[in-house]
């Protein structure tokens, strides 16, 4: 998995590409055609290289032509499930913010493939997964959509009539690429979205960018500030209108805890508080050491978070060494 060119995430992961909606002016079609290799109709004739299950073309491995060319989108705009991409999440050594569904429509197909996709996300739970779709796409899977701490569901908003997915128990955000002035009551929902990203559409339609009007951007900023919603504005917009950088994230996406590490690296970098059992980076904790005989080297016994250390020191009348001072 390569690093993403999308500013507000670390990596992109697209187990499903293509879209069943045949929008007349979809610039995504040109983007996919440039990476599709041979004519998609010719690739579809190679039925021994894929399976057709409902609307989806299912690939168990990368599609390779007779000349050795590997095509990321061999069937063009046809919805394609790349099952071989599920294991690629394991190549990330530390937890990342992973954008899912940046190439096509992610949701709305056979339910069995989403079980595999969500199981892969759970297996590599060190990452945050940022899904992009429409409210309609999410609603089709609402009964199986995981409400988990590291799964975020973004609604793509272009026009004021576009519906927003914001349900109790889910982390929800908006990706706004306004094509007109929006009625900002879309932020005043019964269940408030936790993040707003304002962009040019480049994350969904290759390099083609459509710049929104400055007045629209100012209106969005005003409402997010009033509602205390963090906002991320892509740099192309800030540069064009000479706006101060706005690159805000919700706390969960800022990687301030130790959840981003796993395996051997997690054992090295992350400790567990001996009192409250909370995981935290060892560099933010206090190591507890002891020795049973004078002259012997002290042995590390475990870790305490700073909050629990203060409680232990107060309870047993120990010296509190936090901040470099010793309090009796």
Image (cartoon, helix red, strand yellow):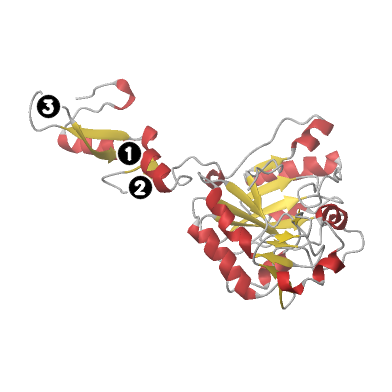
User: CA gap, disc 2 to disc 1?
Assistant: 8 Å
Q: Where residue 103 sits in the image (x, y, percent)?
A: 75, 56
Q: Where residue 296 sits in the image (x, y, percent)?
A: 12, 26
Q: Callout 2: few (<14), some (14-19), or many (20+) C-alpha neighbours within 10 Å?
A: few
> Which badge, 1 or 3, is on the more N-terminal residue?
3
Observer-nearest residue: 54 or 236?
54
Query: Can you tell which of label 2 and label 3 is closer to the viewer?
Result: 3
- Vertical side of 264 occupied by 55: above or below: below
Which type of secondary structure does the marked residue at label 2 adopt?
loop
Location of the C terminus (image quadrant): top left
Disc assigned to residue 296: 3
Query: Can you tell which of label 1 and label 3 is closer to the viewer?
Result: 3
Residue 210 visible (yes or no):
yes
Residue at x 57%, y 61% (from the top left corner): 170
Which type of secondary structure does the marked residue at label 1 adopt?
loop
Can you identify the residue that label 1 sits on?
305
Can you identify the residue that label 2 sits on?
278
> Which badge, 2 or 3, is on the more N-terminal residue?
2
Which type of secondary structure does the marked residue at label 3 adopt?
loop
Q: Callout 1: few (<14), some (14-19), or many (20+) C-alpha neighbours within 10 Å?
A: many
Observer-nearest residue: 309 or 133?
133
Q: Which quadrant holds residue 26? A: bottom right
Q: Which quadrant holds residue 162? A: bottom right
Q: Residue furthest right?
A: 24
Q: Is 197 left or right of 282, judged from the image as shown?
A: right
User: CA gap, disc 1 to disc 3?
Assistant: 26 Å
Kindly indicate whether the residue at mark 1 contacts the one at mark 2 (C-beta within 8 angstroms): yes
């Amino acid at each position: 998995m390569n690093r993403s060119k999308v500013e507000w995430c670390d990596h992109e992961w697209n187990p499903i590409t293509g879209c069943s909606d045949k929008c007349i002016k979809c610039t995504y079609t040109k983007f996919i055609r440039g990476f599709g290799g041979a004519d998609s109709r010719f690739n579809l004739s190679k039925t021994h290289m894929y399976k057709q299950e409902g609307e989806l073309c299912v690939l168990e491995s990368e599609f390779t032509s007779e000349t050795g060319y590997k095509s990321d989108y061999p069937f063009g705009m046809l919805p394609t499930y790349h099952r071989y991409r599920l294991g690629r999440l394991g190549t990330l050594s530390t937890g990342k913010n992973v954008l899912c569904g940046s190439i096509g429509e992610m949701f709305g197909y056979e339910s069995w493939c989403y079980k595999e996709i969500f199981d892969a996300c759970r297996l590599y739970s060190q990452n945050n997964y940022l899904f992009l779709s429409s409210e309609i796409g999410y609603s089709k899977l609402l009964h199986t959509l995981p409400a988990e701490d590291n799964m975020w569901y973004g609604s793509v908003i272009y026009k004021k009539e576009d519906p927003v997915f914001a349900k109790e128990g889910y982390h929800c955000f908006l990706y706004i690429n306004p094509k007109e002035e929006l009625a900002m009551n879309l932020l005043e929902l019964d269940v408030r979205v936790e993040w707003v990203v304002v962009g040019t559409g480049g994350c969904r339609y290759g390099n083609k960018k459509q710049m929104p009007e400055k007045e629209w951007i100012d209106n969005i900023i005003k409402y997010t500030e009033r509602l205390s919603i963090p906002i991320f504005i892509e740099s192309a917009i800030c540069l064009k209108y000479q706006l101060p950088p706005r690159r805000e994230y919700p706390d969960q996406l800022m990687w301030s805890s130790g959840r981003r590490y796993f395996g051997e690296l997690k054992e090295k970098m992350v400790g567990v508080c001996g009192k409250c059992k909370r995981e935290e980076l060892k560099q933010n904790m206090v190591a507890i050491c002891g020795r049973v005989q004078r002259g012997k080297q002290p042995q590390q016994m475990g870790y305490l978070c700073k909050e629990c250390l203060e409680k232990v020191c107060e309870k047993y009348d120990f010296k509190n060494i936090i901040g470099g001072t010793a309090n009796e």
